[in-house]
Amino acid sequence: MVALMALLSIGGIALLSTRMELASSGHDRFTQMATYAAESGANAAMLYLRAECASGSYYSSLVEPNNVNPQSPVEIYGNNKPSGDALNPLAPTMKTAYAVTILNDTADPGLATGEDLNGIIVIRSVGTGPNQSQVTLEIEVQNAACMVDGCDDDFAQRGMTSLNDSRAGCSKTVSFANAATLATN
């Protein structure tokens, strides 16, 4: 009888453990979906911001003094559109959405006055997923040269840094004459 009780106890513990693992994996999946939504929002914001940079004042029209009541531009594709809305680019069956706000970076000397003096801003993208999962991403971006477009019809950019501050033009298109050959065994 003691052995039977011990086996039942072990079986109950195993069942409980399995249920907890299934719940945990579901939560992880929903969090991953919210992460993808937040990343989508950040990418949509970067596309929008390329055209909004003004030489000299950078993103001043998009930042608020001390980041109080930050702007959430409706021009950002899919911004603040709930799952299932025709303007939400994410699949309605996934039940995901994003909300993007634009903040001035805290090191900017114009933070208190609502001016962007250094061309650096923060994109805050909040992605939501099923079962009330939520992920917040904050990405600091700089466009000090107010470059609207990168190189078109090109394979690479010479001298372009991660800060998008290249002074060099685009590289020449790769041709067979200047392509490297790899030796194979």
Image (cartoon, rainbow, N blue to C red):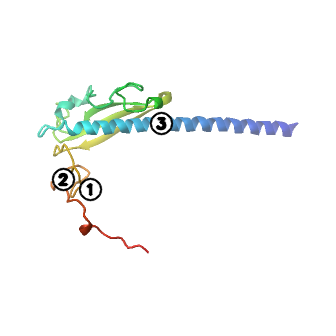
Q: Which residue is mark 3?
A: 31
Tag in front: 1 or 3: 1
Q: Position of residue 47 (x, y in %)?
A: 26, 39
Quarter occupied by the C terminus: bottom left
User: Residue at left 22%, top 59%?
Assistant: 173
Label 3 environment density (alpha carbons within 10 Å; few <14, some 14–19, many ≥20): many
N-terminal of the pair, mark 2 or mark 3, is 3
Query: Considering the numbered disc 2 on the image, is that residue within a helix, a strand or a loop?
Result: loop
The Cα–Cα distance between marks 2 and 3, rounded to whole angstroms, is: 37 Å
Quarter occupied by the N terminus: top right
- Residue in the foreground of this view, choosing between 29 and 151: 151
User: Residue at left 19%, top 55%?
Assistant: 170
For residue 155, the mark is 1
Question: Which quadrant would residue 159 be assigned to in this image?
Answer: bottom left
- Residue in the foreground of this view, choosing between 181 and 170: 181
User: Residue at left 64%, top 35%?
Assistant: 19
Question: In screen coordinates, is 142 left or right of 92?
Answer: left
Q: Position of residue 93 (x, y in %)?
A: 47, 30
N-terminal of the pair, mark 2 or mark 1, is 1
Q: Position of residue 31 (x, y in %)?
A: 47, 36
Q: Which residue is mark 2?
A: 166
Question: Which quadrant would residue 37 be assigned to in this image?
Answer: top left
Label 2 environment density (alpha carbons within 10 Å; few <14, some 14–19, many ≥20): some
Mark 3: amino acid: Thr
Query: Considering the numbered disc 1 on the image, is that residue within a helix, a strand or a loop?
Result: loop
Query: Considering the numbered disc 3 on the image, is that residue within a helix, a strand or a loop?
Result: helix
Question: Which quadrant would residue 138 be assigned to in this image?
Answer: top left
